[in-house]
Each structure stands twice: as structure tokens, then as C-alpha cells.
Amino acid sequence: MTAYRLSSGGLLDRSKVLSFTFDGRPLRGFAGDTLASALLANDQLLVGRSFKYHRPRGIVSAGPSEPNALMTLGSGARSDPNTKATVAELYAGLTAKSQNRWPSLGFDVGAVNGLLSPFLGAGFYYKTFMWPRQLWEMLYEPVIRRAAGLGRAVLERDPESYEKSWAFCDLLIVGGGPAGLMAALTAGRAGLRVILADEDFRLGGSLLGETETIDGSPAPAFAERVVAELLSLDNVTLLPRTTVFGWYDDNVFGAVERVQKHVAEPSATLPTERVWRIAAKRALLATGAEERPLVFGGNDCPGVMMASAIGTYAQRYGVSAGKSVAIFTSGSSGYRTARGLVARGVTVSTIVDSRPEATEAAPDGVRVIRSGAIVDTKGRKRLSGIVIERSGFEELIACDALGMSGGWSPVIHLACQRGARPVWSEDLKAFSAPDVGGGLRVVGSANGVYTLSGCLRDGAEKATTIAVELGFNAAEASLPVIENEAEPSFAALWYVPGAKSKAFVDFQNDVHARDLGLALREGFGHVEHAKRYTTSGMATDQGKLSNVNAVGILAGMRGVSPAEVGTTTFRPFYTPVSFGALAGTSRDGHATPTRKSPLHEWARKNGATFVDSGLWFRSAWFPRAGEKTWRESVDREVLNVRANVGLCDVATLGKIEVFGADAAEFLNRLYCNPMLKLPVGKARYGLMLREDGFVFDDGTVSRLAEDQFFVTTTTAMAGAVMSHMDYCAQVLWPDLKVRFCSVSDQWAQMAIAGPKARDVLQQLIDEDISEAVFPFLAARSMVLRGGINARLFRISFSGELAFELAVPAGYGEAVAEQIMEAGRAHGICAYGVEALNVLRLEKGHLTHAEFDGRVTPDDAGLGRMVSAQKPDFIGKHLSARYGLTAADRMQLVGLKPVDRDKDMRAGAHLLKEGMKPSTLNDQGWVSSAGYSPVLGHHIALAFLKSGRERYGEKIVVWDKLRDHEMIAEVCDPAFVDPENKKLKA
Amino acid sequence: MRYSAFSIVRNALSGNLNWKQQWRQPQPKSHYDVIIVGGGGHGLATAYYLAKEFGVKNVAVLEKGYLGSGNVGRNTTIVRSNYMLPGNEPFYEFSMKLWEGLEQDLNYNVMLSQRGVIMLYHSDGQRDAYIRRGNAMWMEGVSAELIEREQLKKMIPFLNYDHARYPILGGLLQRRAGTARHDAVAWGYARGADQHGVDIIEHCEVTGIRRENGVVTGVETSKGFIGCGKLALAAAGNSSQVGEMADLKLPLESHVLQAFVTEGLKPCIDHVIVYGGGHFYISQSDKGGLVFGAEIDGYSSYAQRGNLATAEHVMEEGVSMIPGLSRVRVLRAWGGVMDMSMDGSPIIDRTSIDNLYLNCGWCYGGFKATPASGYCFAHLIARNDTHPVARALRLDRFARGYAVDEAGAGPQPNLH
Amino acid sequence: MASLITCPHCGVRPKEEFAVRGDASLIRPASSASDAAWHDYVYVRVNPRGRTLEHWHHVAGCRRFLVVERDTVTHEVYSVVDGAAAAREVRR
């Protein structure tokens, strides 16, 4: 045993023992532990294997910058791969497994890669594995893929739930350390709406591992007092366990709250995680500073940790990282940590100080080696000693833990997410936050203020400034007294020369100093190239520890300042965020809204099978007893409509009511065909173009009064047409006197089609709707028997004698049932969109299968609709372009199989008989196809080059994708009733 | 230096100290036969093919940032030739064929991984549209397969078969399609072009285009004036800005597209999967991260960063398609600036100005096009003649009424 | 801008409520205008790096087209006005 739990101290509840397992081994910790502190207390130093060389690795940090202690928590569908043990709150029953090792953490076959490391330098894979070509997918890539990767994603359905929420505040404070707490207190007392978010489960930040006293009491107690006061303020919201991961435009921040990642049995009424979008008038970045590791030979040996982490484990978690601790420092912080450790009863043997002239005093009994350099470490799975070089002499010092202290870097990630670059500060020997304006200010050690009193003061002052800016009266903050403070100092030490073994820069991705040298040698000296070539900084820690050293090393090799090298780009997410949290409740059936027609219940009661159609559920067909396939049902419905009568729900069509003195003029400009002189009481088929001359949508326009129109659109384009009309009315022609609104949801619309449609409908209506009085394309309001206001249209998509009846949505179901009742004697049936599709196909009517956004009216055989007389309409000018009028354009035709038993399917292409398939020889394509029960064979609509000239020609319908080929005859697209006799019956 | 397993061993034995720069870092000469503006994938590929295939070796590539700092370094690495329209499919298949020999040609492993791209369909209408597309591919001799639901379940068992808002009915598979290591493509072309004598000049921003008597004679740059016989623009994302220097007004809007990568995972997704119930696409890099993206943010932007609402929507689509992604953590988001053209298709053409050539408008799809774009652009520059597979991609197609509108969405860039 | 838009009718609203249509500086030519004028109107965009005018449609709000003046690099919004008012202004 070397790492061990101290007999007292730490912010733990030692009365609450928590059992957990690591790689199946049962272990125990206390409430207040992280998984990492508990592992350390159990002397589980070895926690992972590195990415490339599978080197044994131990815990390095005590926070989110952790590169090594990644493990899979939980099991089955609840497993969380790549979880950092250093931020995972311990709970009873937690199960943790190490990753990227086989067969076990202790014995990992992959470690053989270490022996091959001279051949596996940065970018080696770009130079080989190219021969023979086929072996890449068969051999090389699978081997590389299996060796790479970290944890395992099970890709099973996640049983837990997530949610998202907005929050608004005057001041968002990111980080609950000394600066953040003081700012929250100041702003909270002044009355600002404050949100304080901190990724830790306990607020206090560095105060929790602090050895100094504040106003005479221990720092954690001070933090506790402040938190207690903040909790008492209604205008302050504390969000512990909440990581602010991104800063977005308009001072909106993204944050993820781990609501119950830390409980053994999650409550079903709470989400596991919650994503907050926080709109903040002002924000303070109080994210502290990160201690830098040192790059020296053997620095990845388990037991080598950040000095501050060793301090935190001792102070906050009551764990000593070793029996004999050494510190390697380039500044005063190493001494401070050593003092704190000694005060907690941890044995510190040696401080190795890289500086020749250090003045700091070491605690009694601690040896100080100045101008010292560690060049190697001893031990493989656990540190046993360090090799120190000084003035050309080597010395081996035994120790089982080593703290690295290479100075400090402000944590400025969020401030650099919106394009501003970090600024190199010679004073701080670090990259500091750029000035990003008043919306987001940086405070405390994130701002390069490294004394405790300085952080408290900075927090209070900046909060006061913000309060005043926002018009609050902020009281002068009274700052606590801190004794015996010293400003920390350090020398920038990017690389410790003389390494006798690999000196790692990026632990997780196994990038060592020589990789950066190789990158530079090969021309990848730019910081972005070095990153991409060596993968330095691309691991799950995003280089939180490593990046600054990589920059320093590149700067040193290139002989320039780190300012000139610059940094790579900071981007969300500050720490990784789960898909689940970001998706929230929008998944499965809730991924998009569901729309149901007002006739949905009617259809359901009549046994409909439903199909998705955009957001809608539409009735597809209505199977009856004995029907085994959908085709049987659809054929029956079609034949029944053609012979008798059917009722179909068409309520999903877009419906727009247009009013105003200029309503007719407006519609006349909107449609390519004339609308100005449409008589009151009449409907007209209308075609809308886009401004580029292609068909946008089709539908009907009915004039209900001189200044009132009722417009329908297709189901799919209802929203787009409405937006288009908004644009035209507001932006293009703002002076037209026209108003319109969507009434899609207000009307239940149904088609009653078939030779007996009138007989059925007449039973519901007192008014005469005979052919003479209410002919084809008649359209007007009327009152149904019983007093329901309705609108009736003599329009037909099926090609039959048909009506579309619209009633207020709430009456839809009742009216539909009444029609069914009235139609019973006439053999009425309900029919769905599949039958509707067959009916329109037989008739040669078009849908968006034909109008695919690349079709002109002429292509569709509707060229005659385009008004030559109108002075202007949307799409008029560009319709005349050569490419839209060329004679070889593909035109709508019908296709009939020569061998009537053969089927055709949509998506097939067309070839001239005897021609080889090629893009050049491609003659067109089949847009819609299906079996016509009326004709007794398959029919299709297709677009064929110069198609209207080619009626009678035999053409190959080529469906190579399904190995299907047949000959069809080109014909007029109206297969049934081309003379419109039935329509106008 | 030729790369091989042998070269790796030999260099390892000498401490890896003898590797050479992969491309030189020359000072610009006073004049080049051809100057290419933009040291991204397309610019570098153009230079490579100009020198190697068309014998034009006095060429410079000017890059304002570091080599490969544009979209070749920030994309989702997908390579495919599954287009529908006759103006596109031959071009992208030409590109696919170049991809298939690229590593041997360049002596650089760009890790082309022909793992298959499958596009899911969720309705009969979508299926029919994919069948149309698949048959268009076959017309061009490109193999495509329609994978029905039961077969798909065996192939990709973790999709949301049972609870999806839009049922997963099947997919259109192109087995030859896949991914490539994006940075390596830029580096490989750079090294290849350099070996053929091309000067690649990084950190050299073009600030002006000099014309005399209506003819381009050179460019003003941050490193001074550089003369040229022909000037070729390959600055996707910033094409309008560079074009403006020569008073060109282009059918483009610049938009930001976000992409994302997760933490590294052991192999779990073996194909490139495209969701048809939205616009989500995902694959797994050889390093283990899941690489994915969806639609553009929708407003014109030159900022290489996106907004949270779009990011959330992307995750929603991801979880809708693969419920098991829920607990996978997203590591990093980035944004690239796209030239969104008015029909969603690119432009490779001469311009109204003599000696000025244009390559732009790649929308989302520039990466997969890199080899063909470079080859066809080089062909055009060297011979003043459009390569046969790029004939539909000319600039005058809008005026003439021959838009290549794969989405059928019309002249609104953010709908493509 | 990419997070919040201050609609002159509805106040500060999240981006998701809006649909972006595009360049708001374009003026639709007369039907009789030249082919070139129509080509430029429908297909050519200035695509400025910096200040731009863009139509945002408040689809999930008042359904008004707004003219948003904003910066394409910083995403700063300078002004948001009603599109019809702006269109009338231009015609004046």
C-alpha cells in the first residue's frame, strides 16, 4: 500500500460508507468522494491504458482536465464510456471498468505497441499501409480501428430521460470558486437575478482544497457560509453539477446539469441530465486556473500527478497519494503545495526546483534540489523513484508519488469560443483571455489574479461594476482578511532537457516531445498542423493540460515566442456533453410533432391503416375482413369509387383564406394562370411557380365573394406556400390590400367521389346541387341540414363526379359518419390516400412525385395554363429561358406495359430499345406507378425526353436497382376518362 | 523521399531524424504561369494535376492561412458518388475513381475507407426517389443497392427500427463510398504538387487582383505583387470576397455548417449512415470518434462557428436515428463556411475576364469532389476547355435555365 | 443573433422561431426588365463579409418578414425592422 486514506480531515462524511467496484473488485469510499479519490484511497493507482502504446497510466488531476482516468461507469444500456473518474461523484453501487486494455488492466497485450514505438511516430500511418490497395479495408483499417478508440458504446436504447430548459438572468457566474462566490454574493445582495453554475457537486472551487484561513476560519468553512447566504437569497439560483459548455451569440450560454448522474437509483420523475440555455445580460467567467504539467522523461508513470491535485486529494478528500511524495516545480506553487501536504501529515521528501535561484522556504525536513531536472522515472505500473540530473550528475531518489507544478494557465475556454483569440501574456507566462466586451468578463485566477484575496476582491469589484451598469445599487463589498499570502511566481518550463525516456506532452493521445520535433521537421510546425499531424490536444480532454506545453515546445523549437505560435481554436464543448442531454425529450415519437386530421377518429373507427405523411398521419387504406394484402383493399376502394361512391379524408390539404379589395390581384400575381376574373361561386385549378419558372405547388382557388377567396395547397407544401404568400404580400407588394390566414386546422375537408356522390350528398343538403345548379367547379358556402355551415366544391382529384365538402373541424367526424350513413344504400366506402393515389394516377393527375421542383408547367403538360396575357406573375420572366423551353426537355407521359402482366415501379429509368444504359442514353424516369384495377394492368406516369411526340413508341423501363426490365408503350397520361365525361357528369 | 514500410523502418533506425519536409516553404517568385488562390483541397489538387497531368509546372498556390485551413480541414470526411442528376453523377463518379487510385498516385495514405454509405428512407415517396437515384447511378455504371428493412436490420442492428417517429423502411447503399482522412488529403496533394515543382506559399493573403486592358496580370498579396499568366480562384467559403476583387458578382451565399465529433469509442458504427427523417449523417473515424453533422445554420455567415439551437437539433436527429447514441458524449463542434450556390451544385468555369478561372459553390459537398474538382479545373486552366464531366457545372447555367438542382428547392441557397 | 432576435412585434425571441429567407436588399424587377436584371435578382448575391440585410420570417410568431441588419462575421445585430415597412420605404 502506498496511497492511503488519511485518518482524519477532508470534506467527507465518514459515517456514510459507499461500496463500489472497479474492474469487478469491491472497494469502499465515503460520501463526498469522487471516484478518483476513492480509488486513490484504495491505492488503485493504475486506472487506464494509453491510446496508442497502451502504457499503464494513473490518475493525474483532480478535475475535468483528466487525461488518464477514463472509465466506463454502469453497465448494459446504462453504461457511460470515457467517464473521467476525477469528476464522477461516488455513489453506493457504482460500477467502474477500465478501458482500452485486453485482457486486463494489469496485463495488456496492446502494450507491445510500446516496443514498436520507433515505427509508430507521429503520422506514420500516412506513409504506409498503401499496398496492396484492397488490404486497407480488409486488414489494416480493421486492425487500426480495433486498436484505437477508448470506451465501448453499447448503442442500446437509453432507458433514462433528459430535458431542456431556458433560463434568464442579469448575471451568470461560471465557476463557484472564491471569485465566483464573492461575485455572486455581491450581485445577489444588490438584487440582481444571479445564476451561479459550477461543474462540481460542491461549491467552493479552490477554496475546498485551500490551506489558508479566511477571517480566521478554514477556507471551506468560508465557502460554506457564503453558499448558505446565497441559498437564502430568492434572486440567486445555484446550479451545482452544472457545466457551462458553450458561449453563443447574444450572450446565450449552454450548460448541462447532471441532475441524477450521481445517484444509485435514478428517480423516474427526474431527468438524468438537463441542458440549460441561459440568456444572460452579463456573465462572469470565474473558471480559475489550471496547473501545468512538466514534460520530462518518464512523466507518465502512474504516481506522477499534478502537484495541486495531490494537494486537493489530501485537503478535500483526506487521501495521501503516497507514503513519500516528491514535488517537481518551476515556481512557488510547488512549495505551497508541499507545505499544505506536510500540514496534513503527508510525507514530502524532496522538492526538485528547476530554477537556480529559488527563494521560497521549504517545510522543515524537506530537501530542496535547485537547478534540478527529472530526466527519468522508475517503476512501470507504479512510481518507485525519480532520476534527477543536476550539474551533470544523476541521482535516484525513491518516492511513490510525484507532484508536477509547471506554473498556471487561466482557464479561458469559454471566452475564446466566439472567434476571439487568446492573448499571450509575458507577465503571466500564459495565454490570457481576450477582451470580448462587457457581456462576458473574466474574473479571479481565470483573469490571472492568483492570490486568494485578489480573487475575492476581483469578484466583488466586477460584480459591483455590473450591478451599477444594470442600474442596481451595489453596496461596497467588505472583503475578508487573509493572512500570510504571497503572489505566486514561476518560470515557464516547457520541456525538461535530458529526457532518458519518453517525455509526454499529451498523455491520453500518447504524444511525446519527439513527436512534435518530427512534426516540425516534416513541415508541420504551425500549431494547427502540429495538432492535426501528431493528434496532440485532440483527446477527450481537448488538451486542457497539454496544449500550452505543446505551444511552448513548438515555440522553443522554432525559436519564437509562444505569442507567435498561438493556440489552436477553442470550440464548444468545454467538456463533452451527451447526445441525450442535447436532444432532451425530442426523440422517438416526439422527434417531431404529430398532426392528426379532424377526421382521424372517423378513419380509425372505420378501420383505417395509417401512414406518415410529413407531420401528418393519414388514412392509407381501410382493410375489410378477408382482405389479405393492402392491394386487395386498395383495388376494392378504387373500383367502388369508380362504380359507386367513396369518402376520403383530405383535411390535410393546406387551406388559406384570402380577403381584401386586392385579393384577386394578389392571387393573379401569385399563380401562373389567370385568377382575376374567376367568378364568385367558382373554383379553379391553380399552378404556382417559383421565381425561377419551375412549378412550386398546385391547388385550387375558390372565389367565395368578390373580395374573399379560399385557397388550397398540397399537404406537403402547405407551410411553404403560406410563407411564400407572406413574402409576396409583405415584401414584394406591401401596398396591395390583401390579408390572409391559414385555416388548415379550422376546416375538416372530405372528398365524396363517384357516380353516386351527388345522390349521397344531396341527402345532407336542402339546396339543389344538381349538375345544372352546381356544375363542375362550382364552389360556395352552404348550410347542411341541421344547421352546420359548410363549404362545397365541385372539384375532383379522382376524375369522378366528386365534391369536396368542408365543415368546421369539430363537426368533421360527425358529418363524415352521417355521409357514410347516407351512402350506405349507395354502397359507399371509405378510401384512403393509397386508393386516392391510384385514382389520380389513372386520371393522370399530378402530385409532388411529379412536381419535384425541376418541372415546368409545360413539362407536366400544363403549358397552356401559363398566362401570356398577364403583365406579371411570380416566375413569368425566367420561365422563358432557353433551358426551360427546350424541345428535348422531359415531358409527362403515360406508360402501359406491352406485356400486360408485367409491373412497373416508380424510380425506374427509360431507355430506347436496343440502347446501352448510360447517362447520355437516359431518356427519362418513372415518377409514379401502380396497378390500375380499372384497366387490369400496371400503369405509370413518367417524364420522357420530348415525350409528347412519342406516344405509341415502345420504351424500355429500366430498373437495374431491382434487376427489373420491361417494355412499355408511351401514351397519354390520362388513362381513364380522358374526355372528362365522368368528371362533369 | 518515397514513403513505404521500408522508409519507416529505415528512418526509425536513425531516430526518425532524417525525415524531410513534406513540402517546401518557398518565397514567392515574381511571376507564375498559373496562380491558384486557396491552399485547400481543391486548390492543391488543381495544382497537383496541373503539374502532373497537364504539364503546367510553373504554378503557385497562395493560401492566406495555413495549408488546409479551410473546409478540407473541417468536414465530415464523406466520399461518395450517389447523385441523381445527369449533371452531377458523372462528375462525382469521376471523382470516386480518382479517389480509388489516389493513395498510390500520391504515395500518401489518405485512408480512403470504402465502408459504404447508406441513405435511409422512411416513406414510399422517399424510397421511390432513392430508386430513381440508384438507377441514375447504374446508368453511369455506378453500383447501388436497395437494402430493404429486414436486410438492413441485420446489417445495422442498432437503428431505431421500433420507435422512430418516421419508420426506417430501408436504404440506398453505395458500397464503394465511404470516408477519407481529410487533413491527409490536403497534405498528400501538397506534397505531390510540391514534388512536381509547384510553389505552395502559406500565410500569403491575396488582397487584390491586378488587371491590365481587361486581362488579369497578377495579384496583390500580403507578400507583395505576384504576376501570373492565369489566375484560378479556389477559395470556397470566401469566393464572393475574392471574386469581388475582380468585380465578379457570383451566385453564392456563404453559410456556416457545423460538424461534430464524439469522444473516442471502440468500433461500433461501420458505415456512413444518412438519416432520411432529417438530414443527419454519421460515421466513425479510424481513431474512434463518431463524426457527424446535419444542416447549415441557415443564415449567411463568415464566422466559423455555429449556434446551439442547430447543434441541439443535430443531436435530436442523431438520437432519433440511433437511440443508443444517447449516452455517447460529444467532444467538439466546429463550423465551416460554405459557398452555398443557387442550385446546390458547384461551379467550375472561366469568367467574363480573360485568364480568370473560377472554382466555387461546393455547398456541403466539396470534400468528396476534391480529386475531380482539381482535375477538371486543371483541365480547364491548361486547355481552356471544360472537361466533359464538368460541362453541366458552368457559370452560365443559371442564365440559360440549366440549374443542376439536386434538391429541387430552387434559387434559395439555404434550402440546398 | 444566432441565438436571439428582437422582433419589433413580439420582443426577444429565440432563433428557432424564425426562418431565414435571404438577402433583403434585392428589389424585384419589373416583368419587362432585362434578362440580366432578372438573372441578377434571382441568382446573384453580393454576399458581403460584414454588414448585411437579411429577411427573417417570424414563422412561429407574428409571421412577419423582418429585415435584420447584421454582421456576417461577428453576428452582431444592428437593427430589426418590419419587412413591409422597409419595402415601402425603399419604394418611396
Image (spheres, grey):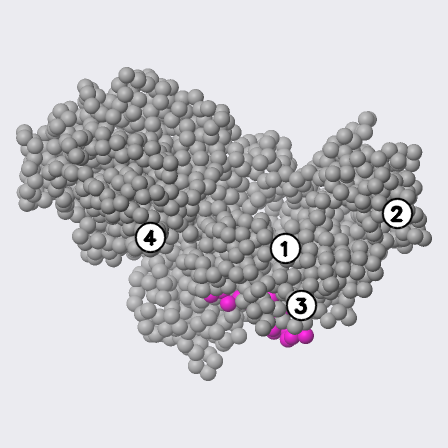
The residue lying toward the viewer, choosing from A40 and B184, is A40
CA gap, disc 2 and disc 4: 72 Å
Q: State which quadrant residue A278 falls in.
A: top left
Near-viewer residue (A436 or C37): A436
- Between the residue at mark 1 and the residue at mark 4, the CA separation in whole angstroms equals 41 Å
Determine whether A68 is above or below A895 in the image. above
Q: Dot 3 corresponds to which residue? A: A878
Q: Name the spot of residue A130 as percent of width and height, x first.
A: 41, 46
* Alpha carbon separation for disc pair 2 and 1: 33 Å
Magenta stretch holds residue A541: no
How far from the left and from the top, in percent, is residue C21?
A: 57, 58
Which residue is under mark 2? A801
Q: Which residues are magenta?
A: C32-48
The chain ID associated with circle 4 is A
Quadrant for the N terminus of chain A in the image: top left
Alpha-carbon span between mark 3 and mark 1: 21 Å
Amino acid type at mark 4: Glu
Q: Amino acid at mark 2?
A: Leu
Assess whether mark 1 and mark 2 are in contact (beta carbons under 8 angstroms): no
Judged left or right of residue A339, residue B41 is: right
Q: Secondary structure at mark 1?
A: helix
